[in-house]
């Protein structure tokens, strides 16, 4: 066999194979470039949309934020896939906005999915998981499942204390939310020290004029009102209102929460002439922000009804409470604690007027701001409860 002739032939075959492989690689690179560019463009679009959601929430434009957040979830899945942390963030945002809108459709599923994604990436006891768990607790609370909400809040607090420590803004938020839940359940004595601890931490870490400090001031004011300390309640409520008007603006839903809270305090102090315009202003803001069929709007109807009742206008009070009850039955159901409380207020109106009994206390949640609602928190940071503020 003549090897001198076989070697050049094998070399030629090898060269052909190499050339084919190089051509295929070049073709793959050319095909890959547009795909990578498209993926980068999708990620950039999602980042811009996520920022837009944040800005809309901050301005109190809830309906627009909800629409943008819905788009953000779909875009996150296209840009990153179904198990990426960005997907968890998008789901979290959408869930928070639905909670604020009192639309709990799919909220539990979204938040559990977000927790599963975060647990895979950061571990099951990370601050990220705690943030989402806090949102899940708020959804439970808003739907009247107080026992499950307390369990979720307690787990949230335990994770924060373990991971970021007891003197941290996230820990203060968890304390605030537990305190608000206890106020809603009627245990104001248990809630008070939690409110005070949350307020002290926020004032130290964030400053006396921070929007989160205002939230704790408003919540402690509502707690003081329930405990009968109207002097402290008014002082705290006015501080909260001043911060929110300056930070969020006079027409923001957080400002409405402070207006409603102060109106309740003034009403209980017998100063209905001062309380009435505050209650009206809060109602106007909430109707503009949430519409006429939202539980927070119902709370403002109740606040104004109680002011009018105490001022002797029982007929108007009845009309307002009937509107509030209609909203609560539609949104929360007939057996929800807030629905029951509103129904009891309405039923007590004629007897209270005839016997000139002392004014009844407002139902849990009267004058309260919505969940995250809410505080306007950043991505991955849940809104804190603001019950009674």
Image (cartoon, rainbow, N blue to C red):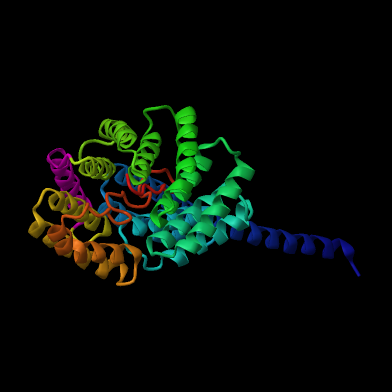
**Residue 297 at x, y = what percent?**
22, 55
Q: Is residue 359 visible?
A: yes
- Residue at figure coordinates x 51%, y 50% from the top left: 131
Residue 114 colored in magenta in the image:
no
- Residue at figure coordinates x 40%, y 68% from the top left: 106
- Residue at figure coordinates x 57%, y 61% from the top left: 116
Question: Which residue reaches farthest bottom?
Answer: 334
Q: Which residues are magenta?
A: 271-291
**In the visual, does 300 lie left or right of 21?**
left
Question: Which residue reaches farthest front?
Answer: 355
Residue closer to the observer: 313 or 240: 313
**Residue 298 at x, y = what percent?**
22, 58
Q: Quadrant of the C terminus?
A: top left
Residue closer to the observer: 338 or 73: 338
Is 347 above or below relative to 174? below
**In the visual, does 68 lie left or right of 267?**
right
Q: Quadrant of the N terminus?
A: bottom right
């Amino acid at each position: 066999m003549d090897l001198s002739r076989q070697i050049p032939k094998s070399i030629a075959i090898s060269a052909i194979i190499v050339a084919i492989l190089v051509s295929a690689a070049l073709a793959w690179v050319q095909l890959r470039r547009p795909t990578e560019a498209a993926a980068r463009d999708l990620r950039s679009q999602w980042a811009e949309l996520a920022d837009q959601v944040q800005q809309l929430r901050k301005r109190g434009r809830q309906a627009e934020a909800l629409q943008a957040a819905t788009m953000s979830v779909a875009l996150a899945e296209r840009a990153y896939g179904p198990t990426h942390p960005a997907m968890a963030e998008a789901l979290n945002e959408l869930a928070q906005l639905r909670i604020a809108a009192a639309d709990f459709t799919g909220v539990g599923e979204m938040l559990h999915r977000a927790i599963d994604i975060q647990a895979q990436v950061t571990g099951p006891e990370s601050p990220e998981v705690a943030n989402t768990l806090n949102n899940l607790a708020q959804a439970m609370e808003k739907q009247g499942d107080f026992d499950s909400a307390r369990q979720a809040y307690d787990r949230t607090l335990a994770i924060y204390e373990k991971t970021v420590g007891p003197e941290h803004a996230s820990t203060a938020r968890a304390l605030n939310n537990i305190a608000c839940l206890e106020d809603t359940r009627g245990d104001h004595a248990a809630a008070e020290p939690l409110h005070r601890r949350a307020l002290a931490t926020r004032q130290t870490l964030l400053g006396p004029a921070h929007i989160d400090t205002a939230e704790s001031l408003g919540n402690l004011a509502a707690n003081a009102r329930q405990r009968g300390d109207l002097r402290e309640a008014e002082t705290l409520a006015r501080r909260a209102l001043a911060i929110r008007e300056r930070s969020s603006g006079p027409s923001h839903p957080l400002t409405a929460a402070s207006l409603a809270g102060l109106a309740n305090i003034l009403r209980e102090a017998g100063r209905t002439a001062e309380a009435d315009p505050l209650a009206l202003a809060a109602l106007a803001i909430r109707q503009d922000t949430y519409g006429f069929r939202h539980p927070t709007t119902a709370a403002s109807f109740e606040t104004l009804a109680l002011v009018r009742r105490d001022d002797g206008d029982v007929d108007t009070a009845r009309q307002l409470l009937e509107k509030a009850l209609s909203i609560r039955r539609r949104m929360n159901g007939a057996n929800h604690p807030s629905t029951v409380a509103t129904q009891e207020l309405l039923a007590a109106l004629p007897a209270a007027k005839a016997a000139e009994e002392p004014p009844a206390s407002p139902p849990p949640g009267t004058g309260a701001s919505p969940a995250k609602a809410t505080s306007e928190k950043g991505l991955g940071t849940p809104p804190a409860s603001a019950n009674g503020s």
